[in-house]
Structure formats: C-alpha cells, structure tokens
Image (tube, rainbow, N blue to C red):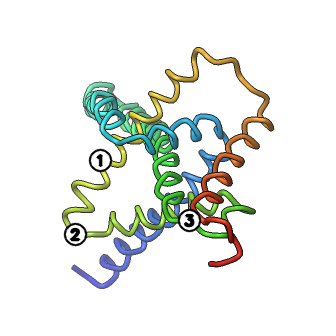
Amino acid sequence: MLMADTLAIFLVVLGFLLALPGLWLLCAGLWPTAVARTTDDCRAGLLFPFLVGIPISVLAFFAAAFASNGLGPASGFVSIAIVCFYVLFASVGIAGLTTSIGNRLPSPADIERPWKATIRGSIVLELAFLLPLLGWFLLLPSALIIGSGAALRSIIKGMGKPKPAPLEAALEGSRDMSKETRESLGSNPGVA
C-alpha cells in the first residue's frame, strides 16, 4: 500500500468523523421536537430503541442489497439512496442519543447554548467509535440501530399529539435542556 492510499483512507475517515456532528446538529435544528422526544427516549433507556431499531436496520440492509443487484442500471443509485435515507433517519435518533450523553456531562455553557450538549455528546460518541474492533463493529452499528429505533418511536409518539408552532417547539426543547443543566450544576452555575 502506497503512502497516498494510506493518506486517502485517513482523510476519508477524518472527513466522515468531522461531518457526523454537523449532521446530528442539522437534525436537531430541523426537527427539534423529534430530537427532544428521542433525547427523552434515550435518557429513559437504550434497550427499547435498540429492539425497535433491529428490524428497521435489517430491512434497510436487505433493501440496499436487493437494490444493488436487482434493478439493472439504476441499481447503484437506488442502493446509495436507501443507505443515505437510512443514515439520515437514524441520525435523528442519534442526535437525541448524543444530546442525552452530553446532558449527562453538564457544563455552565449549556444554560446559554443548549446545542453544546449535542456537540459534547457527539465528540464522546465519535471517540468511542475510534476504538479498534469494539468501536468499529459494536458501537457504530449499535448507535445506528438505537438511532433508527429512537427515531421510529419518536414518530409514533408524535402521531397522536397536535403539532406545536416551530418556534414554540424549539424554545420548549431548549428550556428542558437548560432546566436539566441547571439542576445538575446546583445552586452556583458560575462554577465550572
């Protein structure tokens, strides 16, 4: 393997890891109520989102495999579209998972900037992904499965509720995170 090949692989992996927190923040910005529901779901436990996410992930895998072999000239495009849609769908749930992780690692900055909890959780989760074997083959697939399950559970929970105005939903989510951060920081939020 040439040095150029090694550098190309390294830069692809680095770009992928730099893009993931941005994708999770994008999901939190575009669908704040869904991400708030997935955060609550992941805070309550990861077993049910994992169990719900298994059939979704298996379905996405077999749909992409079938599309790559059975659709003729458009097979590559359809297969990539299925994988991209699955990753975007799972990212809504992973944004909730990373926010849940970040809320468990409180900081005084969360009071004014609640999105920092998502960044903090994203960094922790991505550093765990870098572990050889455990991160690559257990944590990364588990995060995708949990994310897809949490996203589906969020959709199901949101079906019976009336839609709030977008601004109210965003403010409601930021108030919840600020309240949790304030409780974890105690009576003196000025102390880091």
Q: Nearer the viewer, mark 1 or mark 3?
A: 3
Q: Residues under labels 2 and 1: Cα distance?
A: 15 Å
Disc 1 target residue: 142
Instruction: Tell me the amino acid under the disc marked 2.
Output: Pro
Disc 2 target residue: 132
Residue found at the very far top of the displayed protein: 160
- Residue 169 at what x, y percent from top left? 73, 36
User: Quick one: label 3, few (<14), some, or many (20+) residues within 10 Å?
Assistant: many
- Residue 83 at what x, y percent from top left? 39, 39
Q: In this view, does 178 lie to the left or right of 70?
A: right
Q: Residues under labels 1 and 3: Cα distance?
A: 24 Å
Instruction: Point out the image quarter for the N terminus.
Output: bottom left
- Of the image marks 1 and 3, the number of the one nearer the N terminus: 3
Look at 28% across and 55% down and name the residue there.
139
Q: Nearer the viewer, residue 21 or 10?
A: 21
Instruction: Tell me the amino acid under the disc marked 1.
Output: Ser
- Which mark identifies residue 106? 3
Look at 40% across and 61% down and name the residue there.
125
